Amino acid sequence: MIAVDTNVVVRLLTEDDPTQTAAVRSLFAAGPIWIAKTVLLETAWVLRSFYGFDESAIREAFTKLLGLENVHSEDKPSMVVALALTIHGVELADAIHLSSRPPGAVFVSFDRSFVRRANRAGATDVSGLPAKQ
């Protein structure tokens, strides 16, 4: 199994460098690939910041990537849940934080907008902390 860095995933998803894209495609065709959640998070940031991808394009790209038979990721079930939360307007980083919590843990945040979006998306045990005591 080969674990890949952010720049490898970015090359695969953007195809912006023909030589590197060919190398990445060969790598992905050769056998099992493992991708850390942090690599996915950083990849999303790069795609958004430098390539102008919107959240739906990132979600679609990651869904296809994680759906490849030979691609494995750290805590894949929580990544699938996180991607589903983004459909409801939850930012990917927040969705990963939320979906990665231990079973039964209440998730709290000062970000009221995030809490509303998470609750609207059907996430349970998400609540806001008051900004002032």
Image: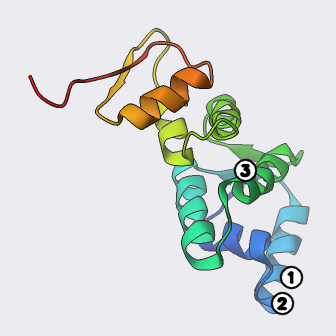
Give the residue pinned by disc 3.
59
Give the residue pinned by disc 1.
22
Element carrying mark 3:
helix
Residue 105 horizontal side relative to residue 124, left or right: left
> Could you classify mark 2 by the number of other residues whose Cα lies within 10 Å: few (under 14), some (14-19), or many (20 or more)?
few
Task: Give the mark nearest the N terminus, 3 or 2.
Answer: 2
Q: In front: 81, or 29?
A: 81
| Residue that extends furthest to the left in the rendered view of this protein | 133
Q: Which residue is drawn at 89% across and 45% down?
A: 69
Gap in angstroms between the C-alphas marked 3 and 2: 24 Å
Q: Residue at x 87, y 49 (%)?
A: 68
Give the residue pinned by disc 2.
18
Q: What residue type is labelled 2?
A: Pro
Gap in angstroms between the C-alphas marked 1 and 3: 23 Å
Question: Do the CB atoms of the residues marked 1 and 2 lie less than 8 Å apart?
Answer: yes
Q: Residue 121 at x, y = what percent?
A: 62, 25
Residue 100 at least partly seen? no
Q: Residue 72 at x, y = what percent?
A: 74, 44
Q: Residue 14 at x, y = what percent?
A: 76, 75
Question: Which mark's residue is nearer the viewer, 1 or 2?
Answer: 2
Q: Which amino acid does label 3 sit on?
A: Arg
Q: Which residue is drawn at 56% across and 19% down?
A: 123
Vertical arrangement, residue 38 with respect to residue 6, above or below? above
Q: Which amino acid does label 1 sit on?
A: Ala
Task: Give the mark nearest the N terminus, 1 or 3.
Answer: 1
Residue 30 horizontal side relative to residue 17, left or right: right
Question: Which mark's residue is nearer the viewer, 3 or 2?
Answer: 3
Question: Which mark's residue is nearer the viewer, 1 or 3?
Answer: 3
Q: Which residue is drawn at 58% across and 78% down?
A: 50
Which quadrant is the C terminus positioned in?
top left
Q: In front: 25, or 80?
A: 80
Gap in angstroms between the C-alphas marked 1 and 2: 6 Å
